[in-house]
Image (spheres, coloured by chain):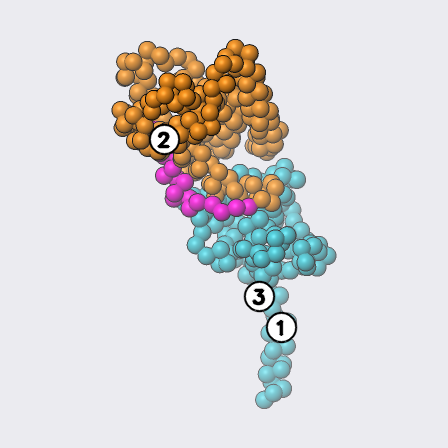
Chain colours: A orange, B cyan
Amino acid sequence: MHEIYNLVTGPLAWLAWGIFIVGSIYRLAIMYILAKKKDAPSLAYMSWGFSLRSIINWLIPFNALGWRRNPLMTVATFAFHICLVVAPIFLLAHVALWDQFFGITYPVLDEKVTDIMTMIVVAACLIFAARRIFQKEVRYVSGFQDWLILVIAVLPFATGLLAYYQLGNYQVMIVLHILSGEIMLAAIPFTRLSHMLFSVFTRSYMGSEFGGVRRVKDW
Amino acid sequence: MKKIALVALLALSLLLPAFLAMAQDDLKEIKSEAFGKLQRPAVAFDHNAHNEKAQIEDCLVCHHSGENGVQDKTTGSEGTPCSECHKVKPTDKKATSLMRAYHKQCIACHTEKKKGPLACGECHVRKK
């Protein structure tokens, strides 16, 4: 246990964070260069006003028409993304580790709250999976990459729950939990999880096109 | 009357270390009242069984003292609750909090000796 625990909390953790940070910068830079080379005119049309208008409108649940058309997905998506980001950052056990390894400490959420948030993440993943299986038009455009990121995203939370409740072999579960979290971090720049980096730009692009070029509010 | 009280006090103070040692014998769990309501289950810890297994005879291995954020490993602190020095929420930013002190005390030694639990749930075991 000592060897493997030290491996996943030491070198592998540094590696995962390194790949995540350096990889993200690399992907953003490469994408910018590519956009400049292949789609320079659209870059010229990018506007702060139309970009922010679109981003803000899409950040409000049930505001954009896209949200209103799919109420279940709207609720699931908002709950999923908020919990996915907030729960791990403000989780007591994670902050205890920041404290143990680096002496860094900040306020945490009550474990009952993060417990429910984690369950919401797992439940939302089930909804997303069901949607990819049962909704015809979604199934048609679902490929390996879509399923891959769903599995990568759900694993740290599912194993986290099992480790938290100490169900199954705890030592195996905690190592799997840490490992799956590291896989998720490292996968962000190089899988469809990269929408974490790019979504703000794609939304800006669409907002600018519909606002600045087509002069419509249909962002 | 005063004399008797004095003698009694003296006798009591001589007995004090014995009381403390007895208290350690009974220690089965590390649980500081200072934390108030606990978020995680208290850590099961059998003082004597642990030290026998870990072959610790010197109290100073764990029961250090210190001042102004500097650990003193030459003077013992047996009988003094950890929370006496390590506050749950220290006002001094450089001070080691009670939780960090406990975690460091146990995990650092376990890591060094390559023995004993490291991960959260290995110590904070849920009662089933």
> Callout 1: few (<14), some (14-19), or many (20+) C-alpha neighbours within 10 Å?
few
User: In the rendered image, which residue does mark 2 sit on?
Assistant: A57
A215 relative position to A173: left or right: left
A126 relative position to A90: left or right: left
| Subunit under mark 3 | B
Observer-nearest of B52 and B71: B71
Q: Position of residue B73 (x, y in %)?
A: 71, 54
**Predominant secondary structure in magenta?**
helix
Question: Number of numbered discs present?
Answer: 3
Distance, label 1 to label 2, CA atoms, is 74 Å
> Callout 2: few (<14), some (14-19), or many (20+) C-alpha neighbours within 10 Å?
some
Single out the mark in the foreground, 3 or 2. Answer: 2
Are the residues flagged by discs 1 and 2 in contact, CB closer than 8 Å?
no
Q: Disc 2 residue type? A: Asn
Q: Quadrant of residue B127?
A: top left
User: In the rendered image, which residue does mark 3 sit on?
Assistant: B19
Q: Disc 1 residue type? A: Ser
Within the magenta stretch, is there residue A116?
A: yes
Start-end of magenta stretch: A105-124
Distance, label 3 to label 2, CA atoms, is 69 Å
A75 relative position to B54: left or right: left
Q: Position of residue A48 (x, y in %)?
A: 47, 28
Observer-nearest of A55 and B30: A55
Q: Does residue A41 appear in the picture of this structure?
A: yes
Residue located at (60% from left, 45% from top): A103
User: In the rendered image, which residue does mark 1 sit on?
Assistant: B13
> Callout 3: few (<14), some (14-19), or many (20+) C-alpha neighbours within 10 Å?
some
Q: Residue furthest bottom?
A: B1
Whether labels 3 and 2 share one chain: no
Q: Position of residue B15 (x, y in %)?
A: 61, 70
Residue located at (47% from left, 22% from top): A46
Distance, label 1 to label 3, CA atoms, is 10 Å
